[in-house]
Each structure stands twice: as C-alpha cells, then as structure tokens.
Amino acid sequence: MAKEPRRRRVHVTQVVGEKGHRYEEPVTPPICDFCADIGPAWDYPCESFQVMPPSVRVPFASHENWLACDPCHELIQQAIETGDVDSLIARMTSSFPLRGKELALLRRDMRVIYGEFLARRTGDPEPWG
Ligand SMILES: [Zn+2]
C-alpha cells in the first residue's frame, strides 16, 4: 500500500498562553508557501532539504511539500520551463516593505531557496484543498 503523503499546512500564527506554557495557534487558514496568500490550490511534492541563503547565517530548512496559490502555480510552471525564478521572487517580495540593498539581498536568498525547491521536487503538483 502506498504511503499517503503528509499534508503540510502553513499558517500565520500568534504566540498565546502564559510564561512557561506558551504555544502558537493559527490565526489564518493555510497560506501559500510562496506569497503567503490565503487559499493555496496546489500541492508540490518535494523532499526535505536544508540550504544556506548567502545573506543570512541561519540555514533555511524545508520539510516536504510546498503549497502554492493559483498565481504562484503559474509562475512556478514558468520557472520549471525556463529555470528563471525572478517572476516568482517578484511576486513574493512585492508584499515586503524593502528597497535597495535589503531587497537585493532578499532576492538573492530567495533565488537560492527557490532554486533548491525546483531541484528537489519529487513529482508533478496536485490540486490541494
Ligand atoms: Zn502564492
């Protein structure tokens, strides 16, 4: 019998509780792993990986599948065909209040992370939700 893939869900969370008993609770429905929009529609199978973005000293760890909304799905499909993730990065960074060097560093880091995501995919996306 085939193993059912784990359905990962990313939410925006808030820390609640009292000192010593704090935990995170979701404050949104599941979100797109690329642009953080509510309402992902695609599940991209991916193996777990860890990569070191060049601008930070903290490794980025990804655990299995990534969820994508419809617009990000279109951009991912373009990136798979062309190897160019710039449109996907532009969509992701459009919600960040960054400019100049900070924005350039974020784009460089996301190029590494998204490049690794594309290389570690383990199959075609499936409708999600
Ligand atoms: Zn998205």
Image (tube, rainbow, N blue to C red):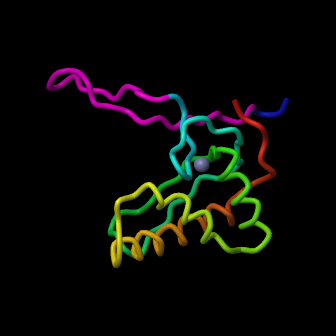
Q: Is residue 14 above or below residue 36?
A: above
Q: Which residues are magenta?
A: 4-28
> In the figure, residue 85 lies in which quadrant?
bottom right
Quarter of the picture containing the N terminus is top right
The answer to which of 76 and 22 lies nearer the viewer is: 76
Q: Residue at x 55, y 65 (%)?
A: 89
Most extreme residue toward the left is 19
Instruction: Describe residue 111's horizontal placement relative to residue 120 as left or right.
Output: left
Any magenta on residue 7?
yes
> Which of 113 and 39 lies nearest the eye of the viewer?
39
Quadrant assignment, res 12: top left
Query: Quick check: is 51 in the magenta stretch?
Result: no
Prevailing secondary structure of the magenta residues: loop
- In this image, 55 relative to 11: left or right? left
Measured from the top left, where is residue 57 in percent x and y?
Answer: 32, 69
Percent x, y for residue 100?
Answer: 35, 77
Write the residue at 55% across / 47% down.
Answer: 33
Identify whether 25 is placed above or below 76: above
For image coordinates 72% across by 35% down, the residue present is 128
Q: Position of residue 97 (x, y in %)?
A: 35, 60
Look at the picture and state if 46 lies above or below 5: below
